[in-house]
Image (cartoon, rainbow, N blue to C red):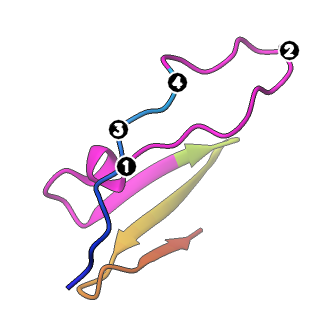
Amino acid sequence: MSDRKPLPTQDREAPAPAGAPAAGPVRIASRALFGDASLVLIEHEGETYSLRRTRLGKLILTK
C-alpha cells in the first residue's frame, strides 16, 4: 500500500505560447490522462505514440 498523495491535475493554468521561454515542467496526474482507460494515444510531431498503464501501475511509452 502506498502512502503517496494524489497529484493535482495541473500545476499551471495553460502552457506558454509558442516562442515564449519555458517556465518549467507542467505536471499532469496520470488519472487526468487515462480516466478509466489503460491506453492513451499521443500525437507528437506527426507521429503517434502509445502510453500504456500496466496492471502493476507502471507506464510504458512506445512509438
Identify the main secondary structure in magenta.
loop
Looking at marks 4 and 2 on the same chain, the residue that comes earlier in the sequence is marked by 4
In the picture of the structure, the residue carrying the numbered disc 2 is 19
Please give left or right for residue 59 compared with residue 21 in the image.
left
- Residue in the picture at 52% in, 24% down: 12
How far apart are the alpha carbons under marks 1 and 2? 26 Å
Task: Report the magenta residues as a range.
Answer: 13-42
In the picture of the structure, the residue carrying the numbered disc 4 is 12
Looking at marks 4 and 1 on the same chain, the residue that comes earlier in the sequence is marked by 4
In the picture of the structure, the residue carrying the numbered disc 3 is 9
Magenta highlight on residue 38: yes
How far apart are the alpha carbons under marks 4 and 3? 9 Å
Looking at marks 1 and 3 on the same chain, the residue that comes earlier in the sequence is marked by 3
Disc 1 + disc 2, Cβ < 8 Å: no
Image location of residue 45, percent across then percent down? 70, 41
Magenta highlight on residue 10: no
Disc 1 + disc 3, Cβ < 8 Å: yes
Disc 4 + disc 1, Cβ < 8 Å: no
In the picture of the structure, the residue carrying the numbered disc 1 is 29
Occupied quadrant, residue 38: bottom left
How far apart are the alpha carbons under marks 3 and 2? 25 Å
- Residue in the picture at 41% in, 53% down: 41
Disc 3 + disc 2, Cβ < 8 Å: no
How far apart are the alpha carbons under marks 1 and 3? 5 Å
Q: Quadrant of the C terminus?
A: bottom right
Q: Nearer the viewer, residue 34 or 29?
A: 29
Looking at marks 1 and 2 on the same chain, the residue that comes earlier in the sequence is marked by 2
- Dot 2 falls on a residue whose secondary structure is loop
